Amino acid sequence: MTQGEKLKAWRLAKEWNLMAAASAFGVSSPSVVSRMESGDYRPGLDLALRIERLTGGKLSAGEWPKRVKPAKKRRAA
C-alpha cells in the first residue's frame, strides 16, 4: 500500500472529507490532499511531519516516495 493509499484510508476511517483533512494538515486546498492520495504530490518535510503527528505515526514522514509519478502527457488537439 502506498503512502497516498494509506493517507486516504486513514482519512476515510476518520470520516473526514478532503476539506477537513486539508484544514487539519494546514494546507491551502483540498486538492493538495487529493494529489497526495493519488501520488501526484509529495509533501515537503514540514507537511509530512504534521501528517505523521496527526496520524499517530501511521504515516511516517520518511516513507513518502522520493519522486512523484510523472505528469500525464496531454495529446495535441
Image: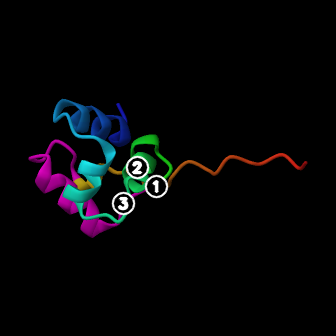
**Is mark 1 in CB contact (under 8 Å) with mark 3?**
yes
Relative image position of residue 13 (x, y in whole percent)? 18, 30
Relative image position of residue 39 (x, y in whole percent)? 46, 45
- Quarter of the picture holding the N terminus: top left
The disc labelled 2 sits on which kind of residue? Met
Residue at position x 51%, y 52% in the image: 68
Quote the CA–CA distance across marks 1 and 3.
Answer: 6 Å
Residue at position x 20%, y 61% in the image: 49
Quote the CA–CA distance across marks 3 and 2.
Answer: 7 Å
In this rendering, position of residue 4 left or right of residue 67 = left
How busy is the neighbourhood of tag 3: few (under 14 within 10 Å), some, or many (20 plus)? Answer: some
The disc labelled 3 sits on which kind of residue? Pro
Question: Quick check: 30 above or below 38?
Answer: below
In primary-sequence order, the first of circles 3 and 2 is 2
The disc labelled 1 sits on which kind of residue? Tyr
**Is mark 3 in CB contact (under 8 Å) with mark 2?**
yes
Relative image position of residue 31 (x, y in whole percent)? 43, 53
Question: Quick check: 58 above or below 22?
Answer: above
Residue bearing the label numbered 3: 43
In this rendering, position of residue 31 left or right of residue 16 = right
Residue bearing the label numbered 1: 41
Residue 46 covered by magenta stretch: yes
Dot label at residue 36: 2
**Is mark 1 in CB contact (under 8 Å) with mark 2?**
yes
Which sits in the foreground, 40 or 2?
40
How busy is the neighbourhood of tag 2: few (under 14 within 10 Å), some, or many (20 plus)? Answer: some
Which sits in the foreground, 53 or 75?
75
Please report the bounds of the magenta region as a residue range: 42-60
Give the SS element for disc 2: helix
Relative image position of residue 61 (x, y in whole percent)? 24, 56
Give the SS element for disc 3: loop
Quote the CA–CA distance across marks 1 and 2.
Answer: 5 Å
